[in-house]
Amino acid sequence: MPVRPEDTNPAPTHDGWRPQVGFAAILLGITALLAWDLVTDRAYRSVSTAHLVVEGLAAFSALGAATWVLSTLRRQGREVQRLQGDLAKSRAEATRWHDEVSELLKGLSHAIDGQFDRWDLSPAEREVALLLLKGLSTRDIADLRQTREATVRQQAQGVYRKADLEGRAELAAFFLEDLLAPPAPR
C-alpha cells in the first residue's frame, strides 16, 4: 500500500478561534456580571431575597456551564493528542511494512497482471478485478470509476466468467491462497 503525500501530513490543528472557548468566556463573563449585580443589589438592599436567589442560581449555573465546557475541551484536547499519536504510529508502521514488502508487491503485481493477460480481461475488467482484490465494494468501485454500480457488477461477472471462478471470494483465493502459509505449530 503506497503511502500518499496526503497520508503523511499531520492532522490539522486549531490555530485560531475556537467557538467553545468563546462560549466558555461568555459564560464566565455572565457569571462575573451576575456576581457583581448580586453584590451591588445586596449592598443597596434594593431587591427581594427571591431576586437574589434567582441571580445567585443563574451565576452558579453559568459558572458550572463554563467549567463543564472548559473541562470538556481539555479532555477532547488530550484525546486529539492521543489519536494523533496513534495515527503517527499507524502511519509509521504502514510505511515500514510497505518498505519491507515493496519488492514482493512488485512481483505480485506483475504476477496478477500476467494472470489477467491469460484470462484475456479487458482494461475495464482488469481495473474492476484489481479493485475487487483490494476489497472495494461494487458501490465504491462505481463511485471511484464514475460509473453505475450495475456496470461494475456486469464487469465483475465478466471477470468471474473468463477466470472460471464463482465470485469475489474465489478471485481473492486464487491469488492469495498460496501466499498465505499455514500458521507455524506452537
Image (cartoon, rainbow, N blue to C red):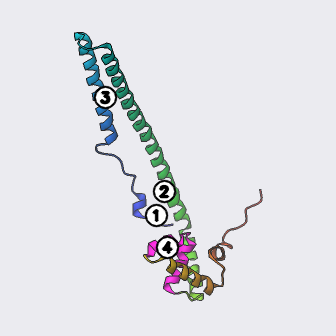
Q: Position of residue 118 (x, y in %)?
A: 60, 88
Measure the alpha-carbon separation of dots 2 and 4: 25 Å
Label 4 belongs to which residue? 141
101 is within the stretch colored magenta: no
Q: Mark 4 or mark 1, which has the lower sequence index? A: 1
Measure the alpha-carbon separation of dots 2 and 1: 8 Å
Label 3 belongs to which residue? 28
* Range of residues picked out in magenta: 122-145
State whether residue 92 appears in this view: yes
Residue in front for this viewpoint, 27 or 75: 27
Q: Position of residue 107 (x, y in %)?
A: 57, 76
Measure the alpha-carbon separation of dots 4 and 3: 52 Å
Nearer the viewer's eye, disc 3 or disc 1? Answer: 3
Query: Tag 3's secondary structure?
Result: helix
Q: Give above or below for 136 relative to 77.
A: below
Q: Mark 4 or mark 3, which has the lower sequence index? A: 3
Label 2 belongs to which residue? 91
